[in-house]
Amino acid sequence: MTTDIRGNPLSCTDAAARRLDGAIAKFHAYLADPIADIDALLAEEPDCVMGHAIRACILATTTDRAFDEELRSSLAAAQRLAPRANARERAYVAAARHWADGDLQAATEAWGRIAIDHPTDLLAVQFAQLGDFFLGQSQMLRDRVARVMPRWHRDMPGHGFLVGMHAFGLEECGDYAAAEAAGREAVARNPQDGWAAHAVAHVLEMQGRAAEGVVFMNETSSGWSPDSMFAYHNWWHLALFCIDRGDIAGALRLFDERVSAGGFGQALEAIDGSALLWRLWVLGHDVGDRWSRVAPAWSARIAHGIYAFNDVHAMMAFVATGDDAAQREVVATLERAALGQGTNAMMSRDVGLPLVRGLAAFGQGDHAGAVAHILPVRGIANRFGGSHAQRDVLSWTLCEAAIRAGDAPMAEAMVAERLALKEGSPVAQGWAARARTVKQPVAA
Ligand SMILES: [Fe+2]
């Protein structure tokens, strides 16, 4: 029987299986370019169902409508070939189908089930973790990896990637010491493991260890940056450390040279572009014409609500550039999505719409309105996915909005939260100083 490198069954030829192993190994490290490798394989072996299925799964987890047509064509090819596929391969096809149909939960559980049935199927674990990430399911980021670990041992190919995935899950669950140890171990075993380095970056971000973060990212970047499809996000993390150190010029340089290097050709890159500039813009820093590099990426995607998390980051660009028409279009997209079916309907209704209304209010100078919209949602914002570090932009915006609104108790409360986590941060201390000058309005 043909199997992958870890003994999981495949219905294709041995030669195709080895080429799939190569493409999958790149995907584990987010190295360029597994899709190109699979395309080359499929050009020679068009009946390789797993090639089509994996291609569909990778494209699905970009959360980007720009790849929708390609996703659907891979899915159609995989479904055509499914009758001759094995059960594991058919399960991959079903997972991609669920995702394409907008049921992110069902897709994630489908990948999770593959990993339960085939605990050494690292690719299924990875897709499930991506699903849990986009669903904001912290516990599952950890436990879906932990549940397969007893069936692994250190010498199995890809074990380091499993440790790196576990590190990220541990971090999102707040187990920072274990997460850091696992992440550093995985990076030491494979310096190209950008996801493991990313897990360490998250620990340092959440613990307010920005100075260490700058050192760690710079020391490890020669491993995770070259040929990476994910490096822009690790550079984004470094930019956050720079901001938290008061190095605004350094953060802008990273935007120019690293975060924007791919031209925001995919939504995940544009998220980081928006999230970085928004933090700076909210603080009142001059970001020059940089929004004009991010906004077009969102304009091209604005009418295609697929994921509320993306729509909120689109809104940041349109608020900062004062594009009222585009803001209205984002709201309309979310309103349509909220009335639809699937996971994104909930995300749009519960989180996306209140947040874009809050961001719009901020842009209009209605800072009290911004607080009123954003504050009640912050505690449930995990429902629209992303990481704690990404959703921290909400607390960031609330600090600034409360101060600008002249709401002294609210400003004191928001800043107190911040200082408790990041006492040494110049950004937090700046807010604290300004919050102390906010005068409590005299009660009538
Ligand atoms: Fe991250």
Image (cartoon, helix red, strand yellow):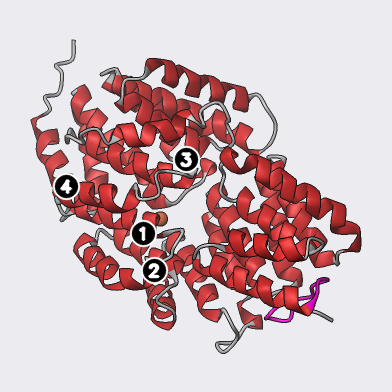
> Which residue position holds label 1?
234
CB at disc 1 and ligand 1 closer than 8 Å: yes
Which sits earlier in the primary sequence, circle 3 or circle 4? 4
Looking at this rendering, what residue extends furthest in the top direction?
A: 444
Q: Which residue is painted at 42% across and 43% down in the image?
A: 264
From the viewer's perspective, tell me whether residue 1 is left or right of residue 61.
Answer: right
> Which residue position holds label 2?
224
Quarter of the image that includes the C terminus: top left
Residue 248 got which mark? 4
> Which residue position holds label 3?
381
Q: Which label lies toward us, 3 or 4?
A: 4
**Are there few (<14), some (14-19), or many (20+) residues within 10 Å of tag 3?**
many
Res. 442 in view: yes
On the image, which quarter does residue 396 sit in? Answer: top left
3D distance between C-alphas at marks 2 and 4: 24 Å
Looking at this rendering, what residue extends furthest in the front direction?
A: 44
CB at disc 2 and ligand 1 closer than 8 Å: no
Q: Is residue 7 magenta?
A: yes
3D distance between C-alphas at marks 1 and 2: 9 Å
Looking at this rendering, what residue extends furthest in the bottom direction?
A: 155
From the viewer's perspective, tell me whether residue 191 is left or right of residue 56.
Answer: left
- Which of the two residues, 82 or 148, is positioned nearer the viewer here? 82
Q: Are marks 1 and 2 in contact (CB under 8 Å)?
A: yes
The percent position of residue 35, horizontal first and vertical second, equals 60, 59
Which sits earlier in the primary sequence, circle 3 or circle 1? 1
- Three-letter amino acid code of the residue under disc 3: Ala
Find the magenta span and give its range.
3-13
- Please say if 352 is above or below 64: above
